Image (cartoon, helix red, strand yellow):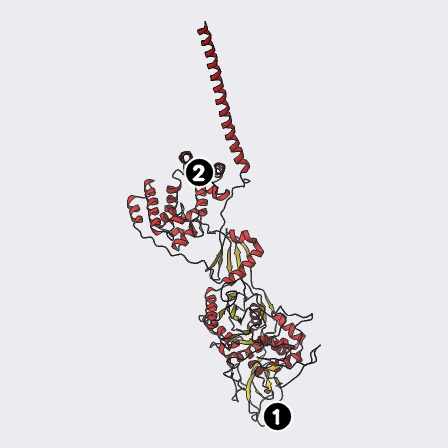
């Protein structure tokens, strides 16, 4: 009986134990299921907001010159998008064989690969093996972080499923091949192909495709730039996998495996024409913003001519003194050069300094132009009836200065006076006193009007310090001017009075080839064509006989030198019918004079740089002279001393040009009576036998270069 009771008790205990265990199992199962549901729900909640999944990786913006040569790429990720049709089948197969052999069979994730990876993760108590399909990798790169957690892994699978529902397999493969990283800043197969082989991805061989496919697993290990032997071993592995999957034969594998690896070599990333590229970049950022510029794959077609750009950089490099480093590590003196097509305004070359600092001296540095400002005053005078033969007296003169007891006495660069002289000679020799007297006669306001009309925008017309004074003609400006502005203004003379706005960007397209903006030259007539021609003819003499002889390039050209009175800025601005260029030399600290190894650097050096550039830039352009407008008279024999019609008694006679109606009507009356008038020459460029004009004096050997141009309305300083 006791035994029976014991048995009954044991049966009851067993039943209770079974029931308890069942409850525990149920609770544990429920907990696990609930936990799994919780994990999934948590994964959904923590996923970034689902976008439309119209994913396209960021793409480099490309900047081209006017001949469609690539100048620069602007990017956060260096990537060039290519369609799958341009990606070799060998590369597609190589990636599939190494990354996802069942790519065309699964629906976004591969359960076999995941199980294999999960076992490895459990053995190591953490995420150590991927098991991700190509679709999962795309989802991770496109929408997720790269942290290794179970939640992130689950999100990766969920995104992959949605990608598979939205895109075809080929579309997913195209996205992936344009997304993946290949090391050294290259994203996508096209950028990688250029990085390693220097060619388009569509032109890759089997061996090259296998090498690229192998790099993706670990660019830091398998890049041939990091370890050529490791790259060879990895390529062999990829080729073997391709053979195993039936993509290539054993013979093809052997040939590719035995092909030597040839790469183009790593190059320091440096944009050509860095100052111009930055000038364009600032315009793009203002119009489109950072995302579009650095990620949007824009195509920017510019006006730059890379050959001319190279010529400009070479001219500055070869003709500026070696200089020395300043406190910022920049070489001083600095220089800038900008060149335009005068008929279109296209910026063909731009050098903003030597070095690659952010300060573009071609467009941001406002400097005193010195006597390079004189042509604007001469243009105003010629337009108002003065002629190249008009005689003015180079003699001492004083001008009262408001608020000062001391008068201003303009002086010439050599402190000498030449007496009566024609305006042509005064401009060729850069005679300051004559220029100041001329400005005084035509009026400062008139000169300012013409300078503004021709493109000078920085003149200050009011306030305590302003440019409404006689030192204007010597380039003593309140703010100064930039090389780009000077080139633009001189371009008016080159085009016969037509002003054209400088242009850097011709067309911008988006990544699909849609035109976002397109520009045409904007032209305005701002000066009479006859006036422009006469001033140009006078400025040709500056190069042929005057202060700009160092700029003689053996073809018709016109220009003007300029040096600030304190010798801090040296200029030459000149042009042919095809090209206008401005050259500036100076120190970044504006008060430091241009002296190197005890020698002053003047405008002759700027003219030398201009000449070197123009010779190279125009070497394939046939020489041409400036077109002659109607209403210009040639070959009128005039007396150099009186500016009147010459007689046989005149000791110095020259054949001069005039705008019709401004030619002299009376014969010279300072060299005796008229016996037999001299006859005009019939055509442009001809001359009558005469004494040559007074030559410009040669500079003395010490100092090597005298100051030229400029001036200050408070201090009487020599200028040239």
Q: Position of residue 239 (x, y in %)?
A: 33, 45
Q: Is residue 223 visible?
A: yes
From the viewer's perspective, is residue 648 above or below residue 503? below
Front position in the image: 470 or 661: 470
Q: Residue furthest top?
A: 1
Side of 402 where 387 appears, left or right: left
Secondary element under disc 2, as helix, strand or loop, is loop
| N-term-proximal mark, 2 vs 1 | 2
Q: What label does residue 670 carry, if any?
A: 1
What's the distance in space between the residues labelled 2 and 1, CA to CA? 106 Å
Q: Residue furthest right?
A: 403
Front position in the image: 605 or 545: 605
The number of numbered badges drawn on the structure is: 2
From the viewer's perspective, is residue 580 above or below residue 47? below
Q: Position of residue 196 (x, y in %)?
A: 39, 53
From the viewer's perspective, is residue 10 above or below residue 330? above
Q: Is residue 385 visible?
A: no
Q: Position of residue 472 (x, y in %)?
A: 63, 75
Side of 225 where 375 appears, left or right: right
Side of 383 where 77 appears, left or right: left
Front position in the image: 77 or 83: 77
Q: Residues within 10 Å of mark 1 (few under 14, many from 20)?
A: few
Secondary element under disc 1, as helix, strand or loop, is loop
Q: Residues within 10 Å of mark 2 (few under 14, many from 20)?
A: some
Viewport quadrant of the N terminus: top left
Q: Position of residue 292 (x, y in %)?
A: 54, 52
Q: What label does residue 127 carry, if any?
A: 2
Front position in the image: 490 or 578: 490
């Amino acid at each position: 009986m006791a035994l029976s009771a014991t048995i009954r008790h044991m049966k009851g205990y067993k039943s209770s134990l079974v029931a308890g265990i069942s409850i525990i199992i149920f609770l544990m199962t429920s907990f696990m299921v609930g936990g799994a549901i919780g994990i999934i729900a948590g994964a959904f909640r923590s996923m970034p907001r689902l976008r439309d999944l119209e994913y396209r990786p960021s793409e480099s913006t490309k900047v081209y010159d006017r001949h469609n040569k690539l100048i620069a790429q602007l990017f956060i990720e260096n990537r060039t998008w290519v369609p799958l049709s341009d990606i070799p089948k060998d590369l597609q197969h190589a990636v599939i064989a190494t990354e996802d052999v069942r790519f065309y069979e699964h629906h976004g994730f591969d359960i076999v690969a995941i199980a294999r990876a999960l076992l490895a993760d459990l053995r190591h108590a953490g995420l150590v093996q991927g098991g991700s399909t190509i679709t999962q990798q795309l989802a991770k790169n496109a929408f997720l972080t790269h942290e290794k957690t179970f939640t992130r892994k689950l999100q990766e699978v969920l995104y992959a499923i949605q990608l598979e529902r939205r895109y075809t397999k080929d579309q997913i493969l195209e996205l992936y091949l344009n997304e993946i990283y290949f090391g050294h800043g290259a994203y996508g197969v096209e950028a990688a192909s250029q990085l390693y082989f220097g060619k388009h991805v569509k032109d890759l061989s089997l061996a090259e495709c296998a090498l690229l496919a192998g790099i993706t697993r670990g660019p830091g290990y398998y890049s041939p730039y990091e370890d050529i032997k490791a790259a060879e071993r990895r390529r062999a592995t990829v080729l073997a996998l391709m053979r195993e999957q039936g993509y290539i034969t054993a013979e093809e594998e052997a040939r590719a495996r035995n092909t030597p690896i040839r790469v183009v070599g790593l190059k320091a990333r440096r944009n050509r024409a860095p100052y111009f590229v930055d000038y364009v970049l600032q315009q793009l950022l203002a119009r489109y913003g950072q995302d579009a510029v650095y990620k949007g794959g824009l195509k920017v077609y510019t006006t730059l001519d890379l050959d001319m750009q190279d010529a400009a950089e070479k001219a500055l490099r070869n003709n500026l003194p070696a200089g020395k480093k300043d406190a910022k590590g920049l070489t001083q003196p600095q220089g800038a050069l900008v060149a335009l097509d005068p008929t279109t305004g296209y910026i063909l070359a731009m050098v903003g300094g030597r070095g690659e600092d952010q300060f573009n001296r071609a467009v941001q540095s406002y400097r005193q132009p010195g006597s390079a400002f004189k042509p604007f005053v001469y243009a105003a005078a010629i337009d108002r009836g003065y002629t190249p033969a008009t005689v003015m007296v180079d003699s001492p003169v004083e001008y009262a200065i408001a608020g000062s007891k001391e008068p201003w006495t303009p002086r010439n660069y050599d402190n000498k006076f030449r007496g009566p002289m024609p305006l042509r000679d005064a401009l060729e020799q850069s005679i300051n006193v004559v220029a100041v007297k001329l400005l005084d006669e035509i009026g400062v306001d008139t000169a300012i009007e013409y300078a503004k009309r021709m493109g000078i925008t920085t003149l200050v017309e009011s306030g305590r310090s302003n440019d409404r004074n006689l030192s204007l003609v010597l380039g003593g400006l309140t703010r100064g001017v930039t090389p780009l502005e000077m080139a633009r203004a001189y371009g008016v003379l080159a085009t016969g009075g037509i002003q054209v706005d400088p242009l850097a960007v011709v067309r911008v397209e988006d990544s699909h080839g849609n035109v976002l903006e397109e520009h045409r030259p904007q032209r305005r007539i701002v000066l009479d064509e006859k006036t422009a021609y006469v001033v140009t003819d006078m400025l040709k003499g500056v190069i042929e006989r005057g202060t700009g002889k160092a700029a003689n390039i053996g073809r018709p050209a016109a220009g003007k030198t300029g040096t600030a009175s304190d010798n801090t800025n040296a200029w030459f601005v000149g042009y042919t019918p095809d090209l206008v260029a401005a050259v500036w030399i100076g120190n970044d600290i504006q008060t430091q004079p241009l002296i190197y190894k005890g020698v002053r650097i003047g405008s002759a050096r700027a003219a030398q740089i201009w000449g070197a550039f123009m010779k190279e830039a125009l070497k394939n352009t046939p020489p041409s002279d400036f077109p002659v407008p109607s209403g210009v008279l040639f070959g009128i024999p005039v007396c150099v001393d009186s500016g009147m019609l010459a007689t046989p008694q005149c000791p110095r006679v020259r054949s001069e040009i005039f705008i019709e109606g401004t030619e002299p009507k009376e014969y010279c009356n300072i060299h005796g009576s008229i016996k037999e008038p001299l006859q005009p020459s019939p055509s442009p460029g001809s001359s009558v036998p005469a004494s040559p004009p007074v030559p410009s004096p040669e500079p003395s050997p010490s100092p090597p270069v005298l100051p030229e141009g400029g001036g200050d309305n408070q201090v009487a300083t020599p200028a040239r």
